[in-house]
Amino acid sequence: MQTVLYQFLIEIPQAAAIWSALLLLALALLAALVARPERESPSDAEPVPDPAAEEAARLADLRRYADEVAVAAAGAAQTARRRREQWLRAQDEVDRAWQAYDEAETAARRLAGAAVLPAPRTPRTPAEYATRERWLHHAAMGAHWRGELSARQLADVLAHRNGWDPRRHPAEQEIVLARVVRDVRRAGYRTAAEREQRAWRDAELAAEAARALAVEAYAAAAALRPGPAPVRRTESTTQALAPVAAGAAPARPARWRPARVG
């Protein structure tokens, strides 16, 4: 028993020394692993930026944008030309409507001056009234074919409605017909003037949009060229339009000139 106890007491310090050495070695390895930074794998590393590739991508984006803006500017210029042509046609219609109204106004004024004279005396017989009715129908049909009376007004004449009395003398009927034609021409002129104003506004807006896109296309194209390039700036102009007062004699139409593109 003493020999076994003696060996046990001798081997305990040796085992403790071995375990202590192993523990110190483990602590040293752990400290080395903690202190050393982890190496990144080649796949996890961020790619190094390539200035040439970035510049090529930027130029490609600029070129694509410049092409898109150029196409849009060309389409806007075409729209502006089409709107200007529409405005010019509307202006021609206003000129024709004004001329027709002026002629109708002159005729109505001339007949109004003759209205102060007494109507010729004719025998009031059924044949005379039939002749007056035929004259009224013939005059109304001619005015309708010339575009001076609408289909509804012609129907009123033929049905003897709205003040159309076939028993009146043809001189009186001519005065009434001239006044109605004058009113129709005046309404047609006002309608044409309103269409011209709308066409002018559309042409002005289209021209302004075309100018803005042209400036943008110029700036985009200049960005592709080496060296700085100045960018032109334009300011839009607006004009107030006064409608024709209802019930008053219309004035001669004003001329609106939309700005040309470019």
Image: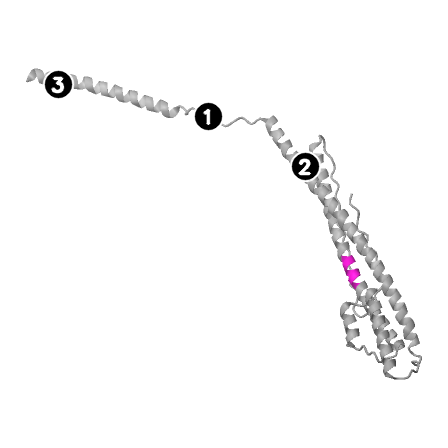
- Report how many numbered discs are placed on residues in the image: 3
The answer to whether residue 248 is above or below residue 85 is below
User: Which structural element holds mark 1?
Assistant: loop
- Which one is in front, 195 or 37? 195
Mark 2 highlights which residue? 67
Q: Secondary structure at mark 3?
A: helix
Looking at the image, residue 66 sits to the left or right of residue 238; the answer is left
Query: Which colour assignment does the render follow?
Result: one colour
Q: What amino acid type is highlighted by mark number 1?
A: Ser
Q: Quadrant of the C terminus?
A: top right
Relative vertical location of residue 85 with respect to residue 241 in this rendering, above or below:
above
Residue that appears at 62% across and 29% down:
56
Q: Quadrant of the N terminus?
A: top left
Q: Amino acid at mark 3?
A: Phe
Instruction: Compute the Cα span from label 1 to label 2.
Output: 38 Å
Residue 93 rendering spot, x and y as whole percentages: 82, 58
Q: Nearer the viewer, mark 3 or mark 1?
A: 1
Residue drawn at x 79%, y 74% is 158
What amino acid type should be assigned to the residue bearing mark 2? Asp
- Residue 242: tell me if it is visible: no
Instruction: Write down the residue under mark 1.
Output: 43
Residue 48 % position (x, y): 54, 26
* Of the two numbered discs 1 and 2 in the rendering, the one whose residue sits closer to the viewer: 2
Front tag of 2 and 3:
2
Tell me the SS state at disc 2. Answer: helix
Task: Residue at the far bottom: name it.
Answer: 124
